[in-house]
Image (cartoon, grey):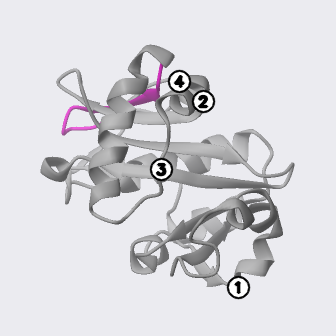
Amino acid sequence: MKQSTGARITLRTAEPAEAKKLHALIHANLQEGHLLPRTLSELTVRANRFVVAVRARRIIGCGELAPLSAQVAEVRSLAVDGKARGSRVGVMIVDELRRRARRDGFEKLCAFTHAPGYFIHMGFSIVPHLWLTEKVFTDCVKCPQFRTCGQYAMVVPLDLAFDAERGYGMPAVSAGAAAAPLS
């Protein structure tokens, strides 16, 4: 499943052999204080849950669709190479994760972030952490930063009418050219 834009960015599912590249990209963003750490072995096992953005055969962005329950999935480890920021790579990845989550039958998509404005522009809303008990009781309670992390809980319904009305989850547009539909 691939998607290309006029900027020659392709979205596809990551492969286990690319775990080191995912780890390096996430680690670079971790140092900026945006992400929580991930182990190389964890990324190798979960590589097929990642969407990667590739330009000129180089991974410039990634994000994981992490199921939390039968109803809720999370955007996790969203990271974009510093040189590729500002080119909507992160938005393209989140849109693809949203499509995949809807296809897989999830009712809502969540994210935990220090930058809520980034997700608000994609239709997410800030909610109390306890509205996402799947995340709190699965991951947060085990985290060394529990109750002190400062992240915002964000959620967006995976409703076709909601997305169509706001233009979210639709094929990304870049440089005036519509993206090829996913198959």
**Vertical arrangement, residue 183 with respect to residue 140, above or below:** above
- The amino acid type found where label 3 is placed reads Ser
Q: Which residue is mark 3?
A: 77
Of label 1 and label 3, which has the lower sequence position? 3
Q: Residue 9 in the image: x percent, y percent?
A: 26, 34
**Which residues, given as a range, are shown in magenta?**
4-15
From mark 1 to mark 3, how far is it between C-alphas?
21 Å
Q: 32 and 85: which one is in front? A: 32
Q: Which residue is mark 1?
A: 128
Query: Which residue lies at the image location 74% right of the left edge and 66% below the top edge?
Result: 141
Q: Nearer the viewer, mark 4 or mark 1?
A: 4
Element on which disc 2 rests: helix
Q: Is residue 113 left or right of residue 45?
A: left
Query: Which residue lies at the image location 59% right of the left edge and 65% below the top edge?
Result: 144
From mark 4 to mark 2, how far is it between C-alphas?
6 Å
Q: 106 and 37: which one is in front? A: 37
From mark 2 to mark 1, how far is it between C-alphas?
28 Å
> Do the CB atoms of the residues marked 4 and 2 lie less than 8 Å apart?
yes
- The amino acid type found where label 2 is placed reads Arg
Q: Residue 25 in the image: x percent, y percent?
A: 31, 41
Q: Nearer the viewer, mark 4 or mark 3?
A: 4
From mark 3 to mark 2, how far is it between C-alphas?
12 Å
Q: Which residue is mark 2?
A: 46
**Vertical arrangement, residue 45 with respect to residue 179, above or below:** above
Q: Residues within 10 Å of mark 4 (few under 14, many from 20)?
A: some
Of label 4 and label 3, which has the lower sequence position? 4
Q: Is residue 143 left or right of residue 82?
A: right
Q: Residue 178 in the image: x percent, y percent?
A: 33, 44
Check the picture and name the quadrant holding the C terminus. top right
- The amino acid type found where label 4 is placed reads Thr
Q: Residues within 10 Å of mark 2 (few under 14, many from 20)?
A: some
Query: Which residue lies at the image location 37% right of the left edge and 45% below the top edge?
Result: 26
